[in-house]
Image (tube, coloured by chain):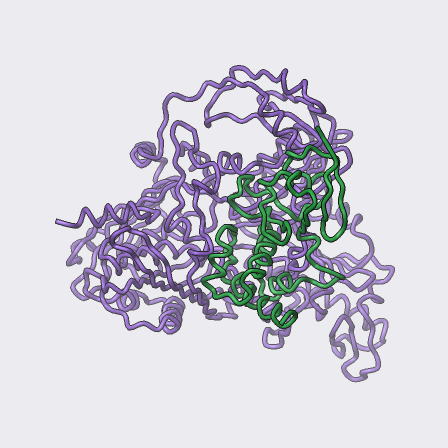
Chain colours: A green, B purple
Amino acid sequence: MPEAIRFTLNGAPAELDVDPERTLLWVLRTELGLTGTKYGCGEEECGSCVVLVDGQATYACGTPVGSVEGREVTTIEGLARDGKLHPVQQAFADHDALQCGFCTPGLILGAVSFLSRNPEPTSEAIKAGLERHLCRCGTHVRVIQAVHAAARTLKEVQP
Amino acid sequence: MTTRRDFLKISGQGIFVVFTVDITGLLAARSIQQRGAPTDFNAYLRIGEDGRITLFTGKIEMGQGIHTSLPQMLAEELDVALDMVDPIMGDTALCPWDMGTFGSMSTRFFGPPMRKAAAEAKAVLKELAAERLRVPVARLATRDGTVYDTQDASASVTYASLAQGRRIERKASGEVRPDDRAAYTVSGVPTMRRDAMEKVTGKAKFAADLRVPGMLYAKILRPPAHGSTLLEADTAAAAGMDGVTVVRDGDLVAVLHERPDAAEAALRAVAARWQQPDSGPGDADIFEYLAKNAPPLRVVTEAGDLAAGRAAAARVFESTYRTPYWAHAPMEPHAALAQVEAGKATVWASTQNPFGVQTEVARALGVPPEDVRVITPFVGGGFGGKTNNRQAVEAARLARASGRAVQVSWTRREEFFYDTFNPATIIKVASGIDAAGKITLWDYANLHGGDRSSTPAYHLPNHRVTSQGGWSGDGPRYHPLSVGPWRGPGANMNHFAMESQVDLMAQAAGMDPVSFRMANLTDERMRRVLRAAAEAFGHAWKPAPSGEGVGVALGTDAGTFVAAMAKVRADRATGSVKVERMVCAQDMGEVVNPEGARMQIEGGMTQALGHALAEEIHFQRGAIAEKNFDSYAIPRFSWVPEIETVLVESPELGPQGGGEPATVVVAAVVANAVHDALGVRLYELPLTPARIRAALAARSP
């Protein structure tokens, strides 16, 4: 039965009366209107639905919404703060690290999570860190460049 | 019938120039199906009362970057800043008929007439300014959205004020010459994507992201295999679920709900019985099946005398190449939202051909095309697969049947099931070389793959190229699975076969693969591109197999000349292949956006590693084995090599194709590098570890 689920969504408190077994993906896309989180495969295979839960890259398609109770969820819509793009978003735009743009939100959030654990990554580490994200347009080489650039910016911001 | 006036009426005030893109044949064949569409123009541009330039075109943006490159060409010709140009794309109510976005044709065929139309618009602006400023047209020039007097800098007038309160319509005559390219400051300059900001913030809307009041999400009952017949569908349990609407519209059985996941749960509650086909080919016997079911033969090109070529050959090589069905697998599955009110439909669809959707939906609903408006939001990858618009027709039928707006958004499983695959292909080649290493014979037959780019770039005095079937026309009828265009359709398979065959002749001639190619090329453009690739690759080539794991492949596609080189690491024990480095040199004529061009080369090469190394659809009696990315591997970050791109410009040729050509040489360059590494040649794609191990085992004594 539906019960109130409370969590922090993109920095603001959220309260929802939904079945806790429903996936975070469909609750975000339907009830909350946050369509930047994409359905690509529904089976945690492609990474298009990745969001941050307490800063960690998480497949929204495999996450029951009840499990984010009391936690902090960040979607692509909430990554920019005070009208300023997150350094990873800025780096993706600066490096043309996207084509069709469908995998981009999940990939950006995956990169944010990755960089929080690996502030000075090698290209090999970036590849390994983003391995579970698929991109069909073949933007990979530019994504790797963008993640390097974002790492440099983040280091300047938070030395 | 929608007239030119109808279009321009809804587009407000301003100065309009309409223009025609004449792609003989293609356009004519398709426009026949488009009764009621205006035939005298395909696109138009408007200089609005605010001085902004709007381009109205049926082309769509699916990642390939024309959302940036077409405005670059307009901004250049009209002397305005790039951000003053707004493209309105793929809306059938605002944009005149267009055949669709495919074939690397947008910049190549659409760009030049658009540029001429812009030149014509500029002429109109100057005429108006001449009246306003009372100076002769010859004294006027344009810059930054204004017309000014070259002899009196204080006399100038903005485009906005010239367009104010006016409705001027012109049809581009093609007689006004565009600017001299030497003076370009926007076109030809590397420019970052204009859609990046929307795409990195999650604001970019794709078809499944659109919402209208009262809409429902549909889940459709699907057969277990193609060719199945529905015997019984018990929908009672689903119909009893809270908020569920069951729709039966002929063969279409669907459940609708205001939440997509609830619709999915309801679909699971439908008990269906199907009669599945009990015969039919599978992937294990597909090539025998295709060899027996061959469509009529067509000669693509021939010259000289094959018998003489054979007689002149010191050695003749007969090979058969095979490639399987492979999938488009865009990250965005097919999606559409449809609304039918008072007999008129609005459909928002992820499609490469909005006007194709318009026709198909109109036919399905039994209404005239002008009663169907198709709007194309951002498309999450197409690669040819979104010329198939089944999901849009489904959404429209369900919207009409339910009286509600309905979204159909395919699951990944549906995406694999209803894909129009790249066709499985058999290519037979007999070729010969003389003692000096010149190619004397080239007898080439493509079965089921398509003839695109099947004529080699080499000097071939005695040659014949034939084609039977393929992905277009009647070709798909001969395939047991649905097939359609896949980025570089036909050209991918043709280049795999052609460039593998050339490579084995180089080896037999005892020449290194670059020198052999150069010795058989007379086309100066192709030679220049090959030299550019070799220079960037920087390798001292030796006859294969050198053990170094390097390969080369070249070719032509969509008017573009391309040469690629690769270095691979191949593991003899496991048969696994890792591509470590790729270089691609490309002559695509005039380059409008060098940044976008490089992005397309990198993307095409990365994507093509998939069908080179892994992608293959397995099937049996209409059932598709691959259902998600766990079983269908596409290139991942760990696969990605270093990629270096070289643009060899031929501006005098105008823009040529950019979206596909780099894709077509990849399978061959990898196969040739694997041969160079291991000494075994593979004649069948993909180059899986199992096939490589089998080839090595077959060679061992």
Marks counted in the figure total 0
Q: Between B241 and B537, which is closer to the camera in this rendering?
A: B241
Q: Please say if B156 is above or below B71.
A: below
Q: Is residue A81 visible?
A: yes
Q: Quadrant of residue B436?
A: bottom left
Q: Please say if B284 is above or below B172.
A: above
Residue furthest front in the image: A70
- x, y (%) of residue B113? 62, 60
Q: Is residue B87 rendered to the left or right of residue B127? A: left
Q: Please say if B692 is above or below B121.
A: above
- x, y (%) of residue A109? 61, 54
Q: Is residue B100 visible?
A: no
Q: Between A18 and B100, which is closer to the camera in this rendering?
A: A18
Q: Is residue B338 rendered to the left or right of residue B556? A: right
- x, y (%) of residue B106? 57, 55
**Residue in the picture at 40% in, 31% down:** B480
Q: Between B261 and B214, which is closer to the camera in this rendering?
A: B261
- The C terminus of chain A - image quarter: bottom right
Residue furthest bottom in the image: B151
Q: Between B362 and B234, which is closer to the camera in this rendering?
A: B234
- x, y (%) of residue B131? 84, 71
Q: Quadrant of residue B282?
A: top left
- The N terminus of chain A - image quarter: top right
Residue furthest left in the image: B701
**Residue in the picture at 52% in, 70% down:** B651
